[in-house]
Amino acid sequence: MTAPSRSMLNLHDVSVSLGGRSILQHVSLSLEKGRFVVLIGPNGAGKTTLLRAMAGLVAATGEVMVDGAPLTTLTRQKRAQKIAYLPQGHQVHWPLSARDVVALGRFPHGLADPENLSPEHAAIIAAAMERTGTTALAARNVQSLSGGERARVMLARVLAVDAPILLADEPTASLDPHHQLAVMHDLQTEARRGTLVIAVTHDIGLAARLADEVILIADGRLAAMGPPAAVFTPERLAEIYRIRAVHQEMAGETLLVPWETVP
């Protein structure tokens, strides 16, 4: 008899208050490795706060378990090895080469000098850049790159962590359609490699097409969770987003196009 697989990430009754205001209320969920999970919700719903709670970057009540261990028992280094976190925005404030930016992802694993790489560190950095199509940018000053190029380099940085969990906060924000699709496909591919990938986005169309699971947050609470078709019902879209959308199945994928607002 095969033993049931252990969840990679478990949240039990997680709540967050900031400045005396309740931001996240009693969220419980369980996520397996190898899944591409998209976290959605209206503006101010608590998406970023939930992602930060998963990473231990904001004080929360309740319990977060990572691969069977309470997050609070892990050292900062062990957390950084287990959870790769890509924050909003793609800004880099130092004149580093793209390769040196990607090399930052190896710091949790003992890298001290990007100019003095062990064969293992060098191989992981090269693989992360290859998977994101950024190898040709390696020697470029990251501040000279376009927004889309910089976004791919920052994604390569978190891939270089080689963590079992990857959290990405609005990784497609301010990108053109080409780079939006490229980044989301990169994240989906990483999930297929066995990583639990959780990405925040406002693009319900991309979520419907590419996600294995969708987490819908509304007013700081878990409103729905499951496959896209189960989450993006007409009733739920009208209630939470106040929109009607066009649904269509094409080539095995769900196309979801916001069409009009509702009162």
Image: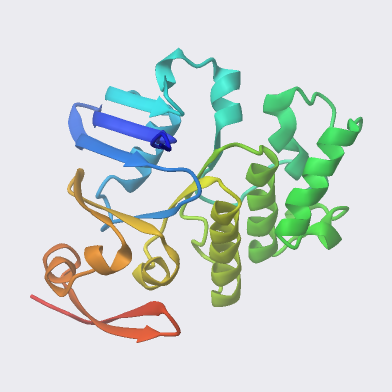
Question: Within the image, what quadrant is residue 239 found in?
Answer: bottom left
Which residue is at 42% across, 43% downward?
Answer: 32
Above or below, comparing residue 154 to residue 42 in the picture: above
Q: How is the image coloured?
A: rainbow
Q: Is residue 176 visible?
A: yes
Which residue is at 85% across, 27% downward?
Answer: 113
* Spot occupied by residue 70 in the image (x, y as percentages of width and height): 40, 19
Residue most extreme to the front: 1
Q: Quadrant of the C terminus?
A: bottom left
Above or below, comparing residue 256 to residue 120 in the picture: below
Q: Quadrant of the N terminus?
A: top left
* Spot occupied by residue 207 in the image (x, y as percentages of width and height): 39, 66
Q: Is residue 97 visible?
A: no
User: Between 35 and 202, which is closer to the camera in this rendering?
Assistant: 35
Count numbered badges in the picture: 0
Which residue is at 63% across, 51% downward?
Answer: 155
* Spot occupied by residue 98 in the image (x, y as percentages of width and height): 79, 50
Does residue 30 appear to the left or right of 145 in the view shown? Answer: left
Which residue is at 45% across, 13% downward?
Answer: 73
Does residue 94 appear to the left or right of 166 in the view shown? Answer: right
User: Between 187 and 251, which is closer to the camera in this rendering?
Assistant: 251
* Spot occupied by residue 204 in the image (x, y as percentages of width and height): 34, 68
